Image (cartoon, helix red, strand yellow):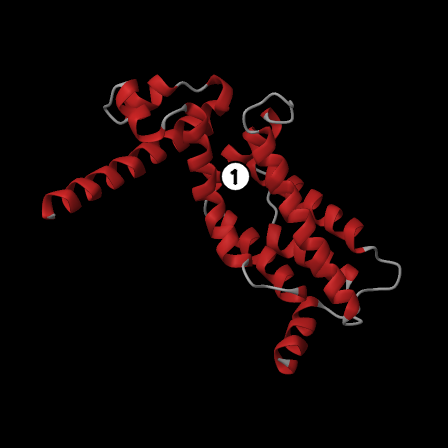
Amino acid sequence: MATQRGAYRKSAKRREEILDAAFDVFSRQGYTAASVNEIARTVGMTQPGLLHHFGSKLALLEAVMERRDQLALDILSGRHDVEFLRGLLEIARRNKAVPGLLRLYSILAAESSAPDHPAHEYIARRFGFVVEGTTRAFEEIRDRGLLREGVDPRTAAIETTSMAEGLQLLWLQGVEVDMETVIRGNFDNYLTVPLAEAAATSVAGA
């Protein structure tokens, strides 16, 4: 049994090393140009040895992206109305600490616009999750009477998502921009009171 546990820990450690290498290669080359053989060489393995752990190049990409998205899912889980918006701000703040992840995601988002790209459905689902979740948050804010008159929740969600995506690209290109501050100001334009005040009201009424 001890030998089995040791083998499992070794295998799990190897998988993490492979994911780190795949992230690095995908970030520099994109999914299409990257090769499984190069990723395998980075961790001192053969291509068959790497595929023993992940099965295919697509499975490897999905594992890398799932690891990237887990933090965001953890932050947004269970949040509603203004707290969901605050969660988006927290993600924007944390993203500045992981430029490599942002670069990988931006490359994949562009590459996967082609319907036959292996990551097309994954990226489409991700955008759908963000837009739907943000739409629901704005609807809940509207139901609390905190959304400005004339603001459509879905339109606000699409504008918010578009702004966040654009800000990430600007920042990656070296433009000095505080993504969290800009997005917060955009939220305030939709609300009848500043987000900080709306959040304080929510906590007080909990």
**Residue 121 position by quadrant:** top right
Look at 69% across and 48% down and name the residue there: 131
Q: Left or right of 42: which side holds 193?
A: right
> Could you say where residue 154 lies in the image, as x and y percent from the top left?
78, 51
- Which of these two is toward me, 171 or 197? 197
Residue 170, visible in the rendered structure: no
> Could you say where residue 45 lies in the image, as x and y percent from the top left?
24, 23
Q: Left or right of 77: which side holds 19?
A: left
Look at 51% across and 48% down and name the residue there: 95
Residue at the extreme right: 150
Q: Left or right of 92: which side holds 205?
A: right
10 Å crowding of disc 1: few (<14), some (14-19), many (20+): many
Q: Quadrant of the C terminus?
A: bottom right
Look at 61% across and 77% down and name the residue there: 203
**Residue 195 position by quadrant:** bottom right
Secondary structure at badge 1 equals helix
Above or below — where is 97 with respect to 118?
A: below
> Could you say where residue 22 lies in the image, as x and y percent from the top left?
38, 29
Q: Amino acid at mark 1?
A: Leu
> Could you say where residue 37 lies in the image, as x and y percent from the top left?
34, 17
Residue at the extreme bottom: 204
Q: Left or right of 43: which side holds 68?
A: right
**Number of marks:** 1
Residue at the extreme left: 2
- Which of these two is toward me, 184 or 70? 70
Residue 9, visible in the rendered structure: yes
Above or below — where is 161 with respect to 146?
A: above
Q: Which residue is mark 1?
A: 102
